[in-house]
Image: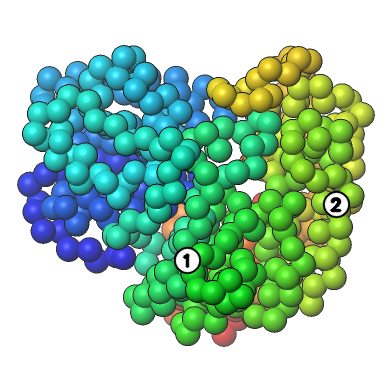
Amino acid sequence: MSGVPQSNPQKTFYLETFGCQMNVHDSEKVVGTLVQEGYRQVETVELADLVLYNTCSIRDKAEQKVFNRLSDYKKYKAQGKTFGVLGCVAQQEGEKIFERAPYVSLVAGSASYRNLPQMLVQIEAGKQRVTGLDDRETDECFETEFTARTNPHRGYITIIEGCDKFCAYCVVPYTRGKERSRTSESVLAEARQMADFGYTEIQLLGQNVNSYKDSEGKPGARKTFAELLAAVGQVPGIKRVRFTTSHPRDFGRDIIDAIDAVPTLCDHVHLPVQSGSTRVLDAMQRLYTRDQYLERIAWMKAAKREISITSDVIVGFPGETEADFAETLGLLEEVGFDAVFAFKYSPRPNTPSLKLDDAIPDAEKARRLEVLMAKQRQIQIARYKKYIGTICEVMVEGRNVARAQWIGRTSHNRTLNFTAPEGAIPKAGTYASVIVTGSFPNSLLGEMVV
Ligand code: 5AD
Ligand code: SF4
């Protein structure tokens, strides 16, 4: 939790985080664990005794970026600094990191963060190379005892780690290990504790939250993901609950029923489609067809509240034809996503799609990406315009001083920047009613209603 005591200010650490929300939250756990051990976090490498990189390997030449960054700082090794590589590149490259970057002493994947104190003791005792790597066999729970959350109003809770889906392009099952769910009791205890600390928004995290499997209590009493979601939404003091990421194959109608029944569950679902072509989805080993995806969209569109839907798309997967790509564009049109995160396919180590032929040239991938983003931009322009004149509740996130605006977020997860009447000073973390007066492709503009 925030406010973890800083018992021993002598030892200092610098932590830089790359990648997704899971990594951001893992870093909060790393900070919590280290602070509890007497370390103090500092803002620059120069001030730190221990330098840690929490790395991401989902796309591109992520490994190379990490090695480049490390080599920028290797001069500090002579000053007695300790370097550690954490996260997905650590898990993926393992002990090879020591060979390529001999100034690194610690290589640890996400399943081992609770053991960081012991690993650091070994380094302090003079051990040159210490590893904490997941072998995909371990059932060890990833829970750490201490978490230093950076935002005092909105916080993450991991409910499930790892992934057993093995999509053909994805490195995650190899870097984050097999699926391990926390018990619903432990998740709820953390949610209640966060509410006591004043948090009003909780985001449940997992690579695939829909695969959540409660292991607590008698089989009949174990909570499904939808039941856990509803229970977190009913924790007194919690006003908003989000969850990410969902996998279409495991996305049940009961999640929509929960959103219908529990007003604190946000009306936003991130449901990565990856491609609109069943043929490509099959090659990606995504385990659903275009029609099955659209069926889930139809459930959402039939919900009591309007649910905003966002997605991820990969363009240029090996063998993706112009006709496949056209199907993806058609799907964007048909669904009307609120936002799409689109990526050029990038071959990753260990993944089955590395062996596929029919690579698409990079220039063609770039072209498809551009076409797709232009299309989605038009869709968003039309969608966002519709909200002009409506009143939305926002959580105030901060102030944009240059524009004399406050930054807000709606339950739909849209950014709504707004002005406030003379004298009104909306505070970060509070909620305000805002009338929408303008729209952009990625955000809304409004005025606070008092
Ligand atoms: N190449 C391109 N995009 C990828 N993603 C995952 N792996 C790859 C890859 N090898 C994208 C997917 C996923 C998001 C987190 O990153 O769209 O949903
Ligand atoms: Fe990767 Fe697929 Fe697992 Fe998502 S569901 S983390 S894309 S393997």
Q: Amino acid at mark 2?
A: Gln
Residue at horizontal 82 percent and vertical 58 percent from the top: 297
Q: Residue 63, position in %: x, y?
A: 45, 23
Ligand 2 location (quadrant): top right
Q: At 45% from the left edge and 73% from the top edge, which residue is drawn?
A: 185
Image x and y of residue 268, in percent: 67, 63
**Residue 81 vs residue 165: left or right?**
left
On the rendered image, what quadrant is the C terminus found in? Answer: bottom right
**Residue 47 image-quadrant placement:** top left
Which residue occupies 81% across, 35% down? Answer: 282
Q: Is residue 435 left or right of residue 283?
A: left
Is 432 left or right of 426, judged from the image as shown? right
Nearer to the camera, 104 or 250: 250
Of 223 and 271, which appears nearest the observer? 223
Q: Is residue 406 above or below residue 276?
A: below
Q: Residue furthest right?
A: 323
Kindly report the distance in space between the C-alpha atoms of the residues bearing marks 2 and 1: 30 Å
Q: Under tag 1, what secondary structure?
A: loop
Please report whichever mark, 2 or 1, sits nearer to the chain's N-terminal start: 1
Q: In this rendering, which labeled residue sits more in front, label 2 or label 1? A: 1
Point 15% across, 58% down: residue: 6
The residue at which mark 2 appears reads as 292
Query: How packed is label 2: few (under 14 Cα within 10 Å), some, or many (20 or more)?
Result: some
